[in-house]
Amino acid sequence: MNGWLTVAMVAVPLLGALLLLVAADVLRPVLRGYGMAVSGVTLALAAVMVATFDHGQPARPQFTVDLAWIPGLDLRFQLGVDGISLPLVALTALLVFLCFAYLGWGGGTAPGQLLHPGPGGARPRALVFTLLVLEVGMIGTFLALDLLLFFVFFEIVLIPMYFLIAIWGGKGRRAAAVKFILYTLLGSVVMLLGLLLIWAQTGTLDIVELAGSHGAGMSRAVQVVAFVAVGLGLAVKTPMWPLHTWLPDAHTEAPTVGSVLLAGVLLKMGTYGFARIAIPILPEGAAAVAPWLGAFAVVGIVYGALACLAQRDLKRMIAYSSVGHMGFVLLGFATLSTAGVNGALFANVAHGLITGLLFFLAGAIKDRYHTADIPSLGGGLLARLPRLGAILTFAAIASLGLPGLAGFWGEMLALFGAFEPAAALPRGLFLVFMVIGGLGAVLTAAYLLVMLSRVTHGSPTAVTAGAPSGGPAVSAGTAPTAGGPDVLAGVASRAAGESVTGRLSATLPEPPDEQPVHPLPDTETPPGGRPPHETPPGAGGPHRGESPDVRRHELVAWVPLIVLILLFGLWPQLLLALTTPAVQTLLGALS
């Protein structure tokens, strides 16, 4: 019934991508609107799916399709959605549409909007094609009800994300893209071996049938081996410590929309695999490996928070925060309890909304300051760009788990699940995990508050920021120095292609081989008419009134995320009513 809806969810972005190949000349002038139109249709289909979903039976697969795919191997094209996958399908459709809106809304020529010709060629048609193919793989992964079909969609996303980083990323994009593809492909090979082992033991690839049988036909030893193999492949994509090292580089070098989709959706594909395949199909293997999974999860929580405290780059800090937040998701799954798994699924959606917003904001700050180096931003964002600073503050406190916002419920339920894990698990060990996870939550608040104190608070200080096109960087001081003038201003030139890192000119002396600073008069207004306490336009970052605070295309992309973060924080039952019956069915013999 209504199986056409799941097929359309995959077919619309796929056909949109194919049209870009066969009608390139026709579509090239309207690329900005084309991407929004195709992703908008997909989002509309997702809204119809949410509206017509039978919320009284969320544990039952709905909108199912079951067609012969490769008859010789008895492989079938099976799609469907239940209470576990429906929120992730809607999240994916929403984030892809918001990314296209961010790229193309308005004139499409603002910083960060890549769908316009730029120096050296911005390849806008290729970018739209890449994002649409990426959407096919992401949505297909959450809709697949066949193990091999799940694997195919799971792998489809790797190639477009590789090109998204390698072509439109930052200076170190190629190395980051290669690291991403190598890690994820190696993990996928191991996962494929586990899926083939399940097929060899049971004779079927039907996920619904396998989950309903709760491991029947597989011995405990086989289940443990299969769970470890499948779990390792999923853990790389999640990513779980210590398999996370590809993530910071990928996030740091990816363009803004790449970081949003990587954090908001791709990481969820790994955690979703635990809920859809590993736990329900291999329950005995899950029970045997759960203590180890919990241990790696809490190490990741603490490690991610400590790594964030040591970061200077804003995007890199947010990337490491994902390691910690995904640790809470894995801890929830490791408890094998209704509360813990519910918390993991809730945290999946909350992380996609909050971290997607954080990466949008990090991209906006980098567009204005031409750097993401936290010390080089100079602080005072609330004074310079008050609306941008206020939204960054909101996203940060949502990420640290403030009650009343979406980030709170997932982590709280994961810790509660560790307090009362499944009966087959050692409760004392999981109580230790709960305490360590609680410490990680405190450290999470610490690094986010430290970031806010350095970026948004205080008086704007003069910094050295990279010029937008690799030109000279301007530095100006605003604080008085002992025995020196109240205001210092200077220009430091760099050769083209060098990395420019900001320095506080009020505290660090200029190297002798660079152009010296020139003091301005202390009391008189210089000939240009600028008072001596002001820095020149563009020095030390944007000044209030000189750069738009929040641009229109940014509001279009950010406001829906803000609304949903508030909505799910104040009314968590919207998600929990969908996931709870499905989780109880998922746990089956373990409950």
Image: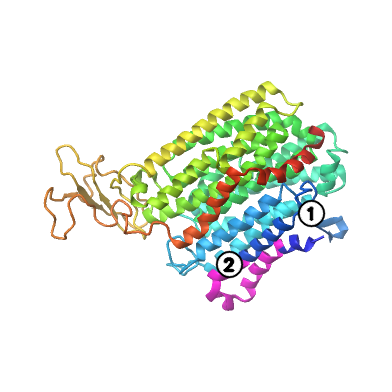
Q: Residue at x 49, y 41 (%)?
A: 397
- Residue 163 in sight: yes
Quarter of image, res 10: bottom right
In the figure, 97 relative to 398: above or below?
Answer: below
Q: Residue at x 74, y 47 (%)?
A: 192
Q: Position of residue 355 (x, y in %)?
A: 54, 47
Q: Element under label 2?
A: helix
In the image, residue 12 lies in the stretch drawn in magenta = yes
Which residue is outermost to the front? 570
Q: Residue at x 61, y 57 (%)?
A: 94
Q: Element under label 1?
A: strand
Q: Main secondary structure of the magenta part?
A: helix
Q: Which residue is mark 1?
A: 62
* Front one among 378 and 23: 378
Q: Position of residue 331 (x, y in %)?
A: 64, 34
Disc 1 marks a residue whose amino acid type is: Gln
Q: Residues within 10 Å of mark 1 (few under 14, many from 20)?
A: many
* Front one among 461 and 201: 461
Disc 2 marks a residue whose amino acid type is: Gly
Magenta segment boundaries in residue numbering: 9-38
Distance CA(mark 2)–CA(mark 1): 28 Å
Q: Which residue is mark 2?
A: 35
Contact between labelled residues 1 and 2, with CB atoms less than 8 Å apart: no
